[in-house]
Structure formats: structure tokens, C-alpha cells
Amino acid sequence: MNMIIMGPPGCGKGTQANGIVQNLGVVHISTGDMLRAAVKSGSELGQRVEAVMAAGELVSDDLMMDIIKERLRQRDANDGWLLDGFPRTVEQAEGLMALLDEIDQSVGAVVSLEVPNEEIVQRLSGRLTCRECGFVTSRQSVGADDPNRCPQCGAEALYQRDDDREETVRNRLEVYQTKTYPAAATLGDRYRLERIDGVGEPAEIAQRIRGVLE
Ligand code: AMP
């Protein structure tokens, strides 16, 4: 089963994606994670995308298509995948559909998580990410005693992503609405699109997703 999960920044996409890949046993392909890894390694790709990401802008469609083409051609992508963070524009959606036709694959479901803007700004400005293991938590959950310690791996490595600052969050939302939201409709013309209310506890939302996938 191949799937796509979409939604505005901070809608809980990453958390839900982790649950889905565990349940379905498919590979998790997160373009945001791939790009952050490139930035961290200081590779040529990382250097090219660092400033664009920090400003909450989108990396170019051509570059993203090259990255996804290479990733979907890897052997582990033959047995099902979940795309998280791709496509983000109508051009990427069209490019993906053409690529999938070429490699004789399809998409079983596109899940779009919907969360109102005010809630997103509130959620993201408190979000913390672990530099070591990628775990995502919030200022409220880690408390004041040891605010940098990751509850998952124990490293003193929690930080606020540059793109989680309030002005950048507002820019990312604008980019989402003008560029990514229309891409969901493009995918919906061809594949099964399920719009799901992303407000609530993560377990509740996971249940909603399972409900529509069954
Ligand atoms: P994410 O972790 O999915 O929120 O992605 C973080 C950042 O990586 C985004 O704000 C973009 O700058 C960049 N990015 C990730 N995926 C894409 C994509 N499909 N197209 C363009 N830029 C992307």
C-alpha cells in the first residue's frame, strides 16, 4: 500500500505518519527529515537548501523531484511507502503522478489533516525537536527543570527549529495555503483523497485515520 499524508505545518503529520508506518509496515519517506539530515551533514544539497528552509520557503520543484525520483527507485520502496511532506505544490503532484505511472505504481490513499491556523501558530511556537534522534515534543511537556533533555533518547539536544519561530510559522502557513492545499485537490482528481479533522488528541486522530483506511 502506498500512501500520502498532507497537512499544514504542525498538524501532527509526523506523529501520525510514524503510527501509520508501524501499522502498515511500509517505509516512511519524509522529505523534511531528508533535507534536515542533508543540512546537518553539511553536504552540497544541505548547503543549497539551508537558508530556504530556515525562511519557511519551499525548495525548488526540480530539486525535490530529483530527490523523490531517487528515493522511490530504491529497493525498499517497492513494498509500500508513506510520503510525508511531498508533494507540496501542484507541479510536484503532477510530477509525482507521472513518475508513478512510469514506475508502474499507484497511491491507495491521500490523507489530508485539517487544522485551523490559530491552533497551528499556538502549537508550533512551543514545539521542540531533538537534534539527536528527531523526537518531537513541546515546551509544556518537558517542563522547566531540564528543558533541553530529550525524553526519548536522553540527550541534551532539544531545540526550536528555525522554521518554528512565529513569523516563519505564519509564512509557512501562507505557503501551505497558496501552494500545498491546491496540490491535495490535484491528487484527489486521480487518487482517493480523505480530508480528516486534525484537531484532538493524537490517539483520536489516529483512530479517525484508521477508520477511513479500513
Ligand atoms: P517539513 O519537515 O515537512 O515541515 O519540511 C521542512 C521544510 O523542508 C519545509 O518548510 C521546506 O522548506 C522543505 N521541504 C520539505 N519538503 C518539501 C517539498 N516537498 N517541497 C519543497 N520544500 C520542501
Image (spheres, rainbow, N blue to C red):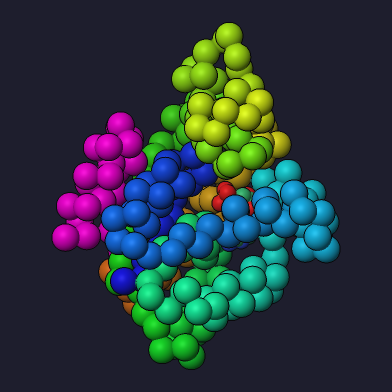
Quadrant housing residue 111: bottom left
Magenta-span inclusion, residue 108 = no
Q: Nearer the viewer, residue 137 or 79?
A: 79
- Work out which quarter of the rendered image holds the N terminus and state it: bottom left
Residue name at image x 22 percent, y 60 percent = 213
- Taking the image in four quarters, ligand 1 sits in the one at bottom right
Q: Looking at this view, is 191 or 150 the one in front? A: 150
Relative to 23, does residue 120 appear above or below in the rendering? Answer: above
Report x, y in % for residue 156: 66, 26
Q: Is residue 200 magenta?
A: yes
| Residue closest to the far front | 154
**Residue 164 is at least partly visible in this image:** no
Question: In percent of the image, x 53 and y 38: which residue is there?
Answer: 135
Q: Quadrant of residue 27?
A: bottom left
- Decide: is 151 above or below 6: above
Residue 81, can we see it? Answer: yes
Is residue 80 placed above or below 85 in the rendered structure? below
Left or right: 144 with respect to 83? right
Q: Is residue 26 left or right of residue 69?
A: left
Compared with 103, 39 (above or below) is above
Q: Position of residue 210 (x, y in %)?
A: 22, 52
Highlighted magenta segment, given as a residue range: 193-214
Q: How many marks?
A: 0
Q: Quadrant of the C terminus?
A: bottom left
Image position, residue 121 (x, y; %): 53, 30
Question: Residue at image x 81%, y 54%?
Answer: 42
Task: Residue 191 in the image: state x and y as whole percent.
Answer: 32, 73
Q: Nearer the viewer, residue 54 or 43?
A: 43
